[in-house]
Image (cartoon, grey):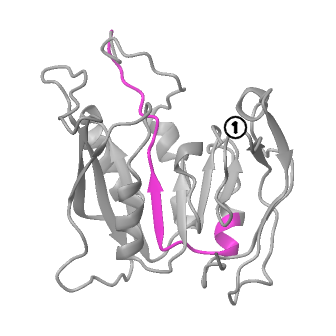
Amino acid sequence: MSPHPTHPLLSVDQACSGSTPNECDSDDSVENDVNVECMSNEASDAFSVASSTVVQEDSFSIPEWSVPINADVLSFDFKKLGSITQFGVILMDPPWQLASNAPSRGVTISYSTLSDDAIQSIPMHHLQTNGFLFIWVINAKYVKAFELMEKWGYTYCDDITWVKRTVNRRMAKGHGHYLQHAKETCLVAYKGNVSSPQGGIGSDVIYAERRGQSQKPSELYDLIEQLVPEGKYLEIFGRRNNLRDYWTTIGNEL
């Protein structure tokens, strides 16, 4: 597979900047330099942003042209990243924190959550002047998600619904406060000047199999890449199972 035409050259070779030991250390991982050299006008702007904790190849395969950065999102140097390249697409799946006596409704959550203020503190203005934001939202955080988009300078334009199914192609129902949940929603917003394909691209409904906890469908990435072909893609709060060629992925679970 050849390098992405417009993907920036990123060198990831320092200690996990700003991350705590629990966020970066793993018994089954080794630290390596991850270098992605791509044919673009920005190839000379290589820089070092954080270390990437790469799992052993026998336990997980990293896509050749992905850029995984294992770092604490709240202390990561987004300003430095934004000074090198601006992204046409930013995707995030925030670990929303619920304020209730039984926030998970009997479901064990295997990851740490963040307050609304912590999520809002991410300096999005450093990363994108013109482009799209895709943000996964849970039912209890719809209003907050719209507030965040406005504070970050985005305008809501659409949403995508992921209807979950089982391996037998039946609707996969889960826990909910009032109703059993069988879907998740990804809000779409934009800022600055963006092009809108005539007639739209793809569908606003994804009918895909439910996988591991918080694992999102690969069909969303396909849809994004159709909307913004050969773009510069960034995922914040990313996980190993969503690493993808030509995407830069930042999170403390890589």
Is 196 left, or right, of 152 in this rendering? Answer: left
Please name the residue shown 85% across and 50% down the image.
32
85 vs 220: above or below:
below
Q: Quadrant where the C terminus lies?
A: top right
The amino acid on which the numbered mark 1 sits, given as a three-letter code, is Ser
Snapshot quadrant of residue 160: bottom left
Location of residue 130 in the rendering, given as x and y in whole percent from the top left corner: 44, 77
Which residue position holds label 1? 59
Q: In this orientation, does residue 6 appear?
A: yes
The foreground one among 199 and 189 is 199
Q: Which residues are magenta?
A: 81-101
State whether the magenta stretch is mostly helix, strand or loop: loop
Location of residue 176 in the rendering, given as x and y in whole percent from the top left corner: 21, 22
The foreground one among 34 and 103 is 34
- The 10 Å Cα crowd at callout 1, few under 14, some 14 to 19, many 20 or more, is few
Q: Let me know if residue 89 is in the magenta part.
A: yes
Snapshot quadrant of residue 239: top right
Q: In this orientation, does residue 148 appear?
A: no
Local secondary structure at mark 1: loop
Please name the residue shown 37% across and 16% down the image.
107
Count of numbered circles in the view? 1
243 vs 165: above or below:
below
Is 36 left, or right, of 147 in this rendering? Answer: right
Query: Which residue lies most toward the left here?
Result: 179
Q: Quadrant where the N terminus lies?
A: bottom right
